[in-house]
Amino acid sequence: MQANSNLENNLRYLFFFVFLFFIFGAYLRFEAFEAIRITEWVTRDFDRAFHLFDGDYVPLAGPERNAGGRLLGPFLYVFLTIPLFFSYSYDSIFAFNLILNLSSIIFFLWFTRKYLGGITAAFSTILLSVNLVHLDSAGFPINPTFMFPLIFVFFFFLFKVSIEENTKYLSVIFLIISLGIQMHFSMATYYLIPLLVLIAFKIKINRKDIFQTLFLLTLCFSPYLIYKQQFYETTIKITEVFFEQKFDLLKVLEIVSLQNLFFRINQGTSLFQFYILPEYISKASQLFGILSFWGLIVFTAQKFRKDGFDSCRIEIVLLISFYIPALIYEITNPPTLWHYWHYFIFIVPVILMKARFLFLLLQVFKKEFLRNLVVLIIILGIAGDGYIKFKFINIHNENWSQSFKSGSFYNPKQIKFIFPALMEKINLSNEEFFTNVYWEGESIQPIRLIDPKGLNRPGLYRKYISDKPCYYIVPREKGVGKSIGIPEKAFQRLNNLFKDNTIKFERQNAIFVSNLAPVGSKKLIAFPYKKKYDQPCYSNLFNPFVVDGKTRSYLKESVGINKEVGNKLAVREISKKEDYDGDSNLISWEKTTLFFHPELNVPIKVMISINKQKGKYRLRSDIFYYSWGKKLKDLIQIKQIDLQIATDDLSANAKVTLVPIIEPESWIAKTSHSLIVENFHWYRDVDLPANFNLKKGKFSLKFLGKTFLVNRANSCCLEFEIPT
């Protein structure tokens, strides 16, 4: 203990480097903040936070999981409302994320120095300051990013319990984990850590702590339990994507030794490729991690043999906190794809493990000169790593400042210039732009970014009232596709629009657009068209996730419908209203019906309204469905829908009229729209022939439809009939 104290005193100068690295790390974070990027997942979560802040509704579940379903509670959205009290804007949430990121470094330094000593704290803080994933998260406010503050708080209380043996904080630890998994499910791997720490050090807990923990967990998950009872979710097998590996002896050895994990969290992290960092940076990080893990095991074994189990308490806690989540990942083998945020949970434990290894390594060198030399080599190595990151991050950020989009990422600063400028070019208001425009290849929904207060997505079933034209916007690129530079895939979809017999195309009035932003360029062609029928414009700039009240109502109405059917069609009447005059002539008729077919695996909501106006009938039909979590091969597309009206009597000799709702040659019937989420709404409003006379008990309505599975060969067509 005396040797450790002398070592701490001799290396106090390390905190000068801590200060320098913190300043450098802060600069890198401000650079990331200046080059902020968003995705449709970011706009999804921000939209829900705005709705919660406005009091529109209280989300009961968290973000959607890749494997289907949603995370186990709404804490993320509660958390994101905090900055909205200061400024009602996206920018306030961006700034909130930056403040959390910077303050977490200071908090990390404070509690690691308190529990792990000055040297370990110094190395931990230095490593965190230049950690690529943590500094990048200051410019990427996706849902797992907001898990970072909870991870730091988790380790603070874990040390309180394990080192001070203060079990009154045990319930807080489990509460933090439970709130964290409402931001990203990966934090569930932390549940075993405190339990194993209690067992390892034989720390006794009383009944009060147990009951308090259970009470807080029940309180934490109660919104989600209500959600599961009240809202429909697509039937999926969440565990189907896990454990996809053969467990032979060699594989078991690989799993136990974490052979794949170190690759996953370093070279397997797409962030290194995103910034085009040299491969040796990720390889060096991987090698440092492996060396620290096994080196810490060796040093811990030596301390145990020399001074007993209790002398290596800190090291055991650090090894447990890294090894247990890592082992769970190795066994379950989750399909993380390029989503590097699945590894956020390893950032802090790996840094602590590396820092502790360096501290124990310095104890090997008895001479002060050698220790100082080793410290200098370590600092120079970390500084070199930081400089290379700085160099490549700056290059990336300079390019990003002139970019609208890269892969799935969008530049919000460019959006703020491009969207309003484009609205002005094609003479559409904010609201008209988001209802009248289909922008080929884009999937961002930055409504609140452009106008936080004034724009919500119009009511889901609201009638189209603008007399402005609709627009189909395609990108222009040099030397690809057709002569005007439209990419081949986009041109094929555009060609479907040219052949659409439900619209009148105005190709000669196409608007060529460029130079929409002060820097960079975005070249587009906006094709105007008019609708031949009273129906929506084709549009894709709304948020496809569950953010509006109408979708929430649909999910509530659909609860349990999938359990009402075996291999047949299930039909559920939601509402019906009808009114007749004294001669039994129809004045108004409205009905809403849900139907579910097991092959489609999604409830489809149909709404029909008939109203007599100026001696003739006006009919409106709406179709809506939503799902998240289906496999790509199970996504559906509606090929055709007709409304069949049988009049005079209900016998086989009844006069039958077909009213087209979705026509097979229309663009919407030929084009698949999203590989992420199914969110489909369509309507058509038509006048029935003047000689139509609908009498009570003398007419019937039926939907006739065809659908197919867009990603399966020869899947057309599943035909269905929905009696109304």
Image (cartoon, grey):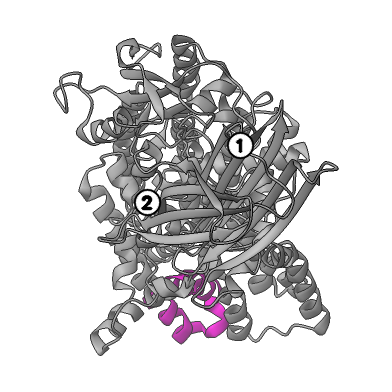
Q: Which mark is residue 99?
A: 1
Q: Position of residue 347 (x, y in %)?
A: 46, 56
Image quarter of residue 455: top right
- Which dot, 2 or 1, sits closer to the camera? 1
What residue is drawn where x is 75% and y is 33%? 85
What residue is drawn where x is 41% and y is 55%? 706
What residue is drawn where x is 60% and y is 74%? 563
Task: Please say if 402 is above or below 509.
Answer: below
Q: Is residue 703 visible?
A: yes
Residue closest to the eye, 332 or 659: 659
Residue 110 appears left or right of 713: right
Q: Main secondary structure of the magenta part?
A: helix
Residue 373 appears left or right of 607: left
Region in magenta = 298-326
The amino acid on which the numbered mark 1 sits, given as a three-letter code, is Ile
Residue closest to the eye, 212 or 50: 50
Q: Residue furthest front?
A: 653
